[in-house]
Amino acid sequence: MSKAFVFGDDIDTDAIIPATYLVTTDPKELGARAMAGSDQPDFAKQVAEGDVIVAGENFGCGSSREHAPLALLGAGVSCVIARSFARIFYRNSINIGLPVLECPEAVDGISAGDAVDVHLATGSVVNTTTGQKFQAQPMPEFMRDIFDAGGLVEFAKQRLQSRE
Amino acid sequence: MGMTMTEKILAAHVGRDVVRPGEIHFVPVDCVMANDVTAPIAIEQFERTGATEVFDPERIILVPDHYVPNKDVKAAEQAKVMRAFARKHRLPFYYEVGRSCVCHCLVPEEGHVTAGDVMVGADSHSCTHGALGAFATGMGSTDVGVIFALGETWLRVPESIRCVFRGEPANPYVGGKDYILALLGKIGVAGARYRALEFCGDAIESLTMAGRFTLCNMAVEAGAKNGIVACDDTTLDYITEHPGADPHVRDDDSVAEDIFRERRPPVVHQSDPDAAYCETHEFDVTGLEPQVACPHAPSNVKLVSQVAGVRIDQAFIGSCTNGRYEDLKLAADILADHPVAPYVRLIVIPASLQDYRRCIREGLDEVFVDAGGVFSTPTCGPCLGGHMGVLASGEVCVSTSNRNFRGRMGHLDAQVYLANPAVVAASAVLGRIGSPEELHS
Ligand code: SF4
């Protein structure tokens, strides 16, 4: 069972991982600082493995730093559900295997601390605290291929091999 | 139905007559760039793909710019990873500190991008290069590591937003920065999410390249995939004047060996009159006042007269947004007759290497230092709160850079205002936010 942490609109990459921590690429080290620039700077201390982030519009706007989705993975976040995502953050997340779902209804129907069940394959999101069920927009097929391959690196490996 | 410039560039790269927004294509990349923050992860991912060689050593540009000269051991380790990779693959376009500057100034001035190109950088402000009439976009490190291996990337063809700027500003201090801030104030930080921002109109045609770079630089602040200005005579002159040097590869034990680089000729694309745009925004810049983005979003835009009076602790002139010669000259002209206010720090950091040299040649460095400021070697510096001007709690900075998110330039409780170089220079003198005209009265 995952606990929900709720954030607002336009959560930028400086909120997810402030620039001063960018001198490492270790997910665990980054994870210990996850959301340090947000209005919940103690997030990293409170989050448990498998918890989810629920956020408003344009989550992850700002810089291209892959440290942002890496920090969330390192902190144990199992999925980000948002009304919408910033372009580079969305791409980075798919590439490195951080599940991201666009689902405005779920964002409306989940409060901080609710227990949430996410089925990535089907895109179904259940708020087990309230019993409400939501259906996220499925990931576009092309991106699901990348995600299913195990991320962009695996996908590229296959593409390289097919060239030989 | 016609096509936009962005669509035409992508169509030309995938060998089709037509592409339409929403389609996903694998697109060959003409130039790929990474810096000291993003390259280490890109290199790691490149190696994980199993590739043993890069797709084309001449098309990979590596630029240490964020934390250089290295600010601490960790930053030095990151730069070392990039340098070792460049050596191993004999990359001719690794720019060592001293021959390097902020990546988005370096790439065009070294002639690595030309009109009609597809350029991808592992840095969100890679959209800057759209000023050359190219398709340029920022991606994360994994995407870029995979481009190192494949030489191509997948792209969803974006819808385009047309931004028309008309007129000639009556205020001599108003320029590209004010145009883009005015747009951001109107459409917000998500106003162009996933879309192309196409800038046109007579005010754009009369804008210098420096102004166009500034404009396209901040397209990403509206969430855009790319910003673009049509290639015209101004662009072609710039491209001719910035051919870049031929590469010299120096190994530890071999002498320099000259390689002549094959330069791509510029390809000029114009949007068709019947191209489809999802939105159009029009601005008359004739009466435009300098714009200031207030904490903590680049879209929180007010007129300089509305925020005049906000006391400042620091003024920063630099960054890939406004760290070019033209920007520094504007600031120097103001600072030549006016010293920096007591208790205020002025930090001037050219973002371009060529412009850094020109500043020194013309004595602008002396102007800044005489005024009571510091003048430093090209680097990102305080723009991302990395080093050389990190803010303490409660401090206020007015900056020519592009982002003012909470914590961007240091402490979470610091406040950053974004403005054009003339406003920042005048504010340094006044000790509070203000406009250059106030100094005359
Ligand atoms: S100057 Fe600032 S915005 Fe530009 S590349 Fe450097 S850190 Fe990024």
Image (cartoon, grey):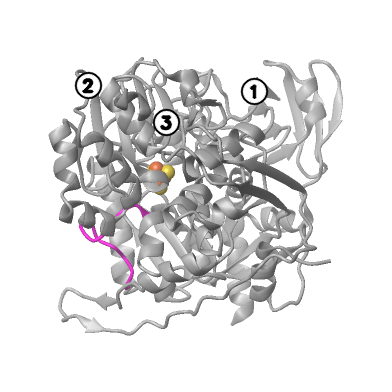
Query: Residue A14: image x %, image y %?
Result: 48, 32
Position of B242 relative to B313 (above/below)? below
Label 3 and label 2: CA atoms lie apart by: 24 Å
* Pointer 1 and pointer 3 on the same chain: no
Residue A143 visible to an observer of this rendering: yes
Label 1 and label 3: CA atoms lie apart by: 18 Å
- Nearer-N-terminus badge (3/2): 2
> Which circle, 3 or 2, is nearer the viewer?
2
Query: Residue B16: image x %, image y %?
Result: 74, 77
Position of B236 relative to B321 (above/below)? below
Left or right of residue B330: residue A137: right
Q: Secondary structure at mark 3?
A: loop
Q: Quadrant of residue B436?
A: top left
Q: Secondary structure at mark 2?
A: loop
**Quadrant holding the C terminus of chain A:** bottom right
Residue behind mark 3: B408
Q: Please name the residue shown 71% across and 36% down the image.
A: A84
Residue B98 counted in the magenta span? yes
Q: Residues within 10 Å of mark 3 (few under 14, many from 20)?
A: many
Q: Which quadrant of the render holds ligand 1?
A: top left
In the rendered structure, find residue B341 and report the number of the disc placed on it.
Answer: 2
Residue B307 counted in the magenta span? no
> Which residue range is magenta in the image?
B92-103
Query: Residue B32: image x %, image y %?
Result: 47, 64
Label 2 resides on the chain identified as B
Position of A119 relative to B70 (above/below)? above
> Which circle, 2 or 1, is nearer the viewer?
2
Q: Please name the residue shown 39% across and 15% down the image.
A: B309
